[in-house]
């Protein structure tokens, strides 16, 4: 569904940055997994390769458990506040704790052994080469792509199911963070806006929303102490984007949780 605004989300720490990248890849995975063409299957496998690379570079289990624990502690603190729906709060805390228990129950890092087949290893190795998974490069992959749908679905389920718990945890975390957002109306003078962050507050994500009809986009940069936003006219042809010279009204959402 098309909304009135375009949202530009920016994570303010590395952990949330990785979580959002994985969230996007999982959504992309869902989209192409529903397709039936060979190109859908190729893109599904390519997306799985990207997900696997993130998992091999980061200890996602440890990072996710830390974030789940942090959220659980914050929610427990809220339970003492007046006006809080304690029943709903207990349900949320229970969901966080049950997800944590499942992750804790796995020994060591997340088990990715189902993606250690010769076929998937070969695809992963060749994926770093532009066009490196052509039929003449990987005849075994070409053969797999031509097999019946039932066989391919079995393999996809085997590869994807190992990410189910970590995906659920990341979805919970990002949902809580986004729901904590406070919205304010602001103006960027001559297309530039800078905001100093309160160092004692746990900022996670900032989001800038612009009207869909606005003829520009926003570039955001920042870290623990501040962020800046530059509003840019979109490029056309060989023209490079340029910062707007007029004042720009926008909505700012600060997610502190």
Image (cartoon, helix red, strand yellow):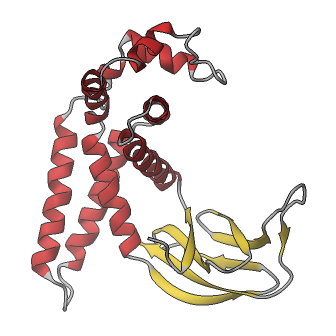
Quadrant where the image shows the N terminus = bottom left
| Above or below, comparing residue 212 to residue 133 in the picture | below
> Which residue corresponds to the image point at 29% horizontal and 52% vertical from the top-left?
169
Residue toward you, 144 or 105: 144
Residue 257, visible in the rendered structure: no
Quadrant of residue 30 within the rendered picture? top left
> Which residue corresponds to the image point at 87% horizontal and 60% vertical from the top-left?
240
What x and y, as percent, mark residue 190? 82, 84
Find the residue positioned furthest to the left.
Answer: 87
Quadrant where the image shows the C terminus = bottom left
What x and y, as percent, mark residue 32? 42, 41
What x and y, as percent, mark residue 133? 56, 18
Quadrant of residue 94 within the rendered picture? bottom left
Residue toward you, 199 or 75: 75
Residue toward you, 101 or 225: 101
Question: What is the tally of numbered marks visible in this picture?
Answer: 0
> Which residue corresponds to the image point at 44% horizontal and 51% vertical from the top-left?
19
> Which residue corresponds to the image point at 65% horizontal and 64% vertical from the top-left?
222
Residue 27 in the figure: left or right of residue 211: left
Residue 133 in the figure: left or right of residue 60: right
Residue 99, visible in the rendered structure: yes
| Above or below, comparing residue 30 to residue 224 in the picture | above
Residue 139 in the figure: left or right of residue 194: left
What x and y, as percent, mark residue 23? 42, 51
């Amino acid at each position: 569904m098309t909304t009135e605004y375009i949202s530009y989300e920016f994570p303010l720490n590395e952990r949330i940055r990785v979580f959002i990248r994985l969230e996007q890849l999982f959504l992309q995975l869902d989209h192409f997994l529903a397709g039936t063409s060979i190109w859908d299957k190729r893109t599904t496998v390519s997306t799985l390769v990207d997900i696997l690379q993130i998992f091999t570079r980061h200890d996602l289990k440890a990072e996710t458990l830390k974030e789940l624990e942090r959220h659980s502690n914050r929610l427990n603190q809220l339970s003492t506040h007046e006006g809080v729906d304690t029943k709903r709060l207990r349900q949320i805390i229970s969901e966080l704790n049950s997800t944590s228990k499942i992750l804790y129950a796995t020994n060591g890092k997340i088990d990715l052994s189902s993606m250690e087949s010769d076929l998937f290893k070969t695809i992963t190795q060749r994926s770093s080469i532009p066009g490196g998974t052509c039929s003449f490069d990987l005849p075994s992959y070409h053969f797999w792509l031509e097999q019946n749908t039932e066989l391919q679905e079995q393999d996809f389920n085997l590869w994807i199911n190992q990410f189910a718990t970590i995906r659920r945890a990341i979805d919970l975390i990002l949902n809580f963070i986004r729901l904590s957002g406070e919205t304010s109306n602001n103006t960027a003078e001559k297309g530039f806006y800078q905001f100093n962050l309160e160092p004692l507050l746990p900022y996670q994500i900032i989001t800038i929303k612009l009207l869909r009809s606005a003829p520009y986009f926003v570039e955001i940069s920042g870290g623990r102490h501040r962020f800046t936003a530059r509003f840019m006219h979109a490029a056309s042809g060989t023209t490079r984007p340029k910062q707007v010279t007029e004042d720009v009204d926008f909505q700012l959402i600060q997610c502190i949780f």
